[in-house]
Image: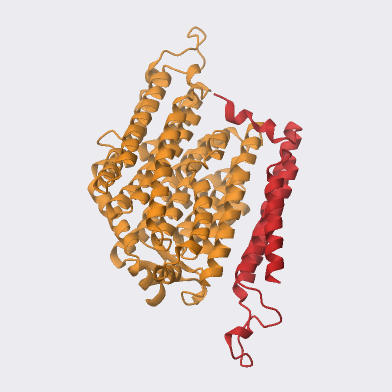
Amino acid sequence: MEVLIAILVGFLYAAGVYMILRRSIVKFIIGIILLSNATNLLVFLSAGLTAGSPAFLSDQVSSQQEFSDPLPQALVLTAVVIGLGIVVFTIALKYKFFEVTGADDLDQLKPTDNQK
Amino acid sequence: MNCVALPILIPLVLMIMQIFFRRKIFSQWLGISGSLLLLLSTFYLFGQVTKHGILTLNVGGWPAPYGITLVIDYLSILMLVISAVIIFCISIYAVSFLKTTGEKQRFYIAFYALILGLNGAFITGDVFNLYVWFEVMLISSFVLITLGSSREQLSGGIKYLSLNLIGSLLFLAGIGLLFGKTGTLNMAQLAEILREDDSAILLNTSAMLFFVAFGIKAAIFPLFFWLPASYHTPNITITSLFAGLLTKVGVYTMIRFFTLFFVQDQPFWHNLLLTLAGLTMFIGGSAAIAQYEIRKILSYHIISQIGYMVMGLGIFTPLGLAGGIFFTLHNMIAKTNTFLVSGMVFKLKGNYHLKNIGGLVKESPLLAVLFIIPAFALAGVPPLSGFFAKFILIKAGFEDGHYFVTAVAVFTGLLTLYSMIKIWNEAFLKKSPEDPSHEKDKIKLSLLEVLPSILLGLISLGMGIFASSVFGYTMEAANQLINPSIYIETVLYNQ
C-alpha cells in the first residue's frame, strides 16, 4: 500500500509541476491543486500507514503497534482545509483578473516586471 | 498572570471588532488605539523576558511535546517589539493615506489578520503551528496586495501568490518528512532528538525543503523574483507594511530552524548560506542601480539587505548572529520609513518616477530630513543604526575568516549608498522638471503622515546612539540561539 501511494505522490507531483509550467492561468491553478494534494498525501504517508486499528490507546490495546497515530491525520485535515481556502481565493483572483484584462496568459503579466 | 498569548489575542479581538463596527471614524481610532495597546503589551512582555528569561505557555493546558507551546525568548521578543512599533506607525499613516480609496474597512480587517499571523509565527514553538500562522499571514497579504483591484495590482498579486503558494507547499512537504523521521513537531523536542542524531543525509532532504520555502518568503537569491514584480503595485501603506515585516519573518524562521535543530551538516549549510547571502546582497544591490522608480529601487534593496541577515546566520558565531539580528531590527525600521517617505513624495509630486520629480528639498525641507535619516541608516552612515549593524557583521565575518563574503558586504554598502544618493539627487536636489509657470495648489502633508516617519527616524537614530544596549540584547538573543539547552529545558521540563 505504501509503495502504491508513494508512486501516486510522485505522479501527482510530476503532473502538478507540468501544469504550473503552462502559460494558462487556469492550468496553473490546476497545477497548484495537484501539488497541494500530492503534499497532503506525502504528509499522510510519511507518518506511516496503519489499517484497521484505533486512533487512541485504550485498555484493550496493549502495544504501540496496534494503534494508529492520529496526529498526521489531524495535520492533513488542517492542510486540506487551508488548501481549499487558498484555491478558492486563487480562483476568485483569477476571475477578477480575467474581468479586468480579459487575459488568461501568464505572458501578459509582464508589464509589472519591465516598467522602469 | 501568563501574558504570552497577548500578541496573538489582541489582533484577533481587533480583527473581529473591525468586522462588526463599520463606522469610518470608529474603525480608524480603533486601528490606532489597538496597535498602541499591542505595542504596550510587547513592552510589558519585553520586561518579563528580561526579568524571567524564556516565557512559555502550553495552549489548552496540554503538556509540552503533545500540545502547542508558545515560547517567547529574546529573539522573539525583539522581533515582536520592533514589528509592533512598525504596526503602530503604519496604523497612523494609514488613516490619511486611505482617505483617497474606499477600502478602509477591508484594509483594517486584513491588516489585523496579517498581524495575527505575524505575531503567531514569532511566538509559536511548534512547526505545524508555524505553518498555520504562515498561511494566515499569506492569505491576508493576498487580500491586501490586490485591494485596489487595478490591472497592475491583480497581475502583481498573481505573481506574489503563485510563488508564495509553491513556497508553502514545500514547507508542508518538509513538515511531512520531518514528522516521518522524528515523530514530533515540537521545536524543543525536535532539537533534543536531532541534536543527538547525526544522520545528516536523511535530514538534509527536509532541511532543504524548509530552506527553499523560507528562502521564497525571505526573497533570497535565486528565489526573490516575486518581490520586485509585486511590491510596487499596492497602496504605499501596504507596501511599507510588507517591506518592513513580511520578508523578515522568513529570515526569523530561518534563524530559528537553523540554530535550533538543523545543525547536523554545518559546513555544508554555512557555506550555502554564505554563498547565497553574498549573491543576494550583490544582485539585489546592483539591480537597484538600474531602476528609476523609487519603489522599485527600494524593493531591490529589500532583497540586498536580506543578504546581510542571512550572512549573520551563515557566520554562526555569537557575534555574527547578534549582528544579523541587529541588522534585521534596524532594517525593519529603516525600510518601512523609506517607503513611508516615498509615499509622501508621491503625495506631493503625484509620481514615483525619479525622472519626473525634483526640487523637493526647497518644497518640503522636513521631508528631506525625514528621507535622509532612514536612507543614511540603510547605507550605514554613523551614527545611525545601520552603521553599527554592518560594523558588527563585518567584524564577525573577518574574525571568523569569511573574507570574501565580508568584502561583498562592504561593497554592497557602497551600492546602497549610491542608490540612496541617486534618489536624493533626483528627487530632492534636482530642479523640478515641471513647468513652474502653472503652479498647482500646494499640497500639504498632514501631521498624521509625518508623525510615523518622525517616530521611525528617531528610533533609527536612537538605535545608533544607544547601540551598545541594543547590541547587548541582540547578543543575549544570539547566546540563547547558540546554546539552545536553556530553550529545550524551559519548554520541555520547566512547566
In the image, what residue occupies the spot 56% across and 39% down?
B226
Q: Picture quarter containing residue A22?
A: top right
In the image, what residue occupies the spot 25% across and 35% down?
B382
Q: Which image quarter holds the C terminus of chain A?
A: top right
Residue A108, image x, y percentages: 69, 31
Residue lying at the far top in this picture: please name it: B437
Residue B403, image x, y percentages: 29, 41
In the figure, the red chain has which letter?
Answer: A
Residue B468 can be seen in this image: yes
Q: Relative to B494, does residue B467 appear above or below in the rendering?
A: above
Q: Which image quarter holds the N terminus of chain A?
A: bottom right
Residue B41 can be seen in this image: no
In the image, what residue occupies the spot 75% across and 43% down?
A26
In the image, what residue occupies the spot 64% across and 66% down?
A76
Residue B75, image x, y percentages: 37, 57
- Which colour is chain B painted? orange
